[in-house]
Image (spheres, rainbow, N blue to C red):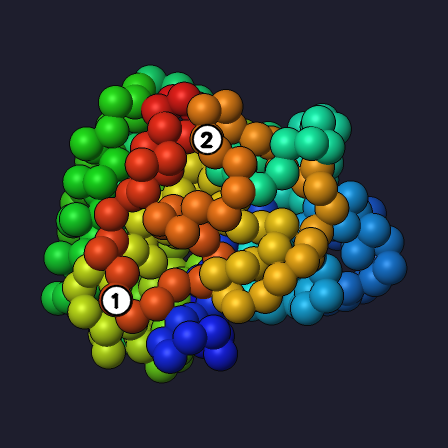
Amino acid sequence: MQFSNFLTSAMAMAFFMVLISSCSKDQFEQSDSLQVTEEVKDKVEGLFFNIDDMVVDEITYPDGTTDEVFKVENDIVFTPEQLEEMIKNFVPFDQELNERQYRTNNLVSNNQTITVCGYTGGGGYGLSNKMRTALSWAVNNYNALNTGLNFSLTYTTNYQPYEMVVYRIPNGQAGGVAGFPSGGNPYKWIQIFSGMDNYDTNTVEHVITHEMGHAVGLRHTDWFSRQSCGQSGESAGPDGAVHIPGTPTGYDSNSVMLACFSSNEDGEFGFYDRVALEFLY
C-alpha cells in the first residue's frame, strides 16, 4: 500500500499487492533476476491488471529473507509461476459486467479451516500490540460470515506450519501486501507495514481484512477505475475480473476491498463484501 493524494488522508491500499506464485522464470527471460519485459507486460495486461506502474520488487519474509516478485497496482505482487497459473485458469468474461465486486480465477478450496499465524518474533517483523488486536478483529470479521471457511488464529513465532502468516514490515510506510490463492490454498504471506501503528486500530483492522480478502481471491472492488484513490476512468480492460453475482453495478464506497483507504475506516465489511464472500464460499 502507499499514500494517495486523494482527500486529506487517503492512502493507496495494497490490493492488494497481490503476490502470485509462478512457473519457471525461463519462460520470461534467461536472467537470474526478474525483468519487466514486454512479454511479461503483455501477459499481465492480458489478465486486465493495470501495468502503468509495473515494477520488479522484493517480498521480505519473517526471517528476513527475500524473493523477487512483480508488483502491479501499487500493492499486488506475484511470481512468474503464479502469473502462469493465473493465465492457465483465465476465462474471458462478459464485457458488460464491470464496476462490481470481483474475484480472481484462483480461489481457496471450500469447507476448510484456514490456520492463521499472527507472527510475534523479533527483527522488527513481529506484530505490534495494536496489530495483534486488529488481526483478531479481522479474523472475527471472516468467521462471522456464513461461509464454509473457518479461520483459526494463533500468535506464535513458529510460522511455517500455518496457511496464512500475518507479520509486520519495518519500513515506516502505511498499508500492506498480499497475494492471491494458488493450488487451492490461500496466499500465505500477509505483510502489514509498520507505519500502520500511526493509525487507529479500526484502520489497521481494515487493512488486514483487505489483505486477507486478496489472500482468498478478492480483487479490488474498483480495479477498473481506482476511484477510491481519486482517479477516474478505466485503468484496466472491462472484462479483467470475474464478477460475483449479487453485487451491485456502480462504485461501492462501503467496500473494504477498495484500492485506497482513509484514516477513519471502521474496519468492517460492507454489505456487498459479505454477499460476495458468502456467494464464493
Neighbour tally class for label 2: few under 14, some 14-19, many 20 plus, Cα within 10 Å: some
Can residue 77 be seen here? The reply is: no
Looking at the rendered structure, the secondary structure element under dot 2 is: loop
- The answer to whether residue 186 is above or below residue 138 is above
Residue 264 image label: 1
Q: Say which residue appears at 69% left-offset and 32% top-offset.
A: 96
Q: Quadrant location of residue 199?
A: bottom left
Residue 183 image label: none
Q: Quadrant location of residue 169?
A: bottom left
Give the image location of residue 170, x and y in percent: 34, 76
- The answer to whether residue 140 is above or below residue 150 is below
Amino acid type, callout 2: Thr
Q: Earlier in the sequence, mark 2 or mark 1?
A: 2
Amino acid type, callout 1: Asn
Can residue 109 be seen here? The reply is: yes
In this rendering, would 86 be left or right of 156?
A: right
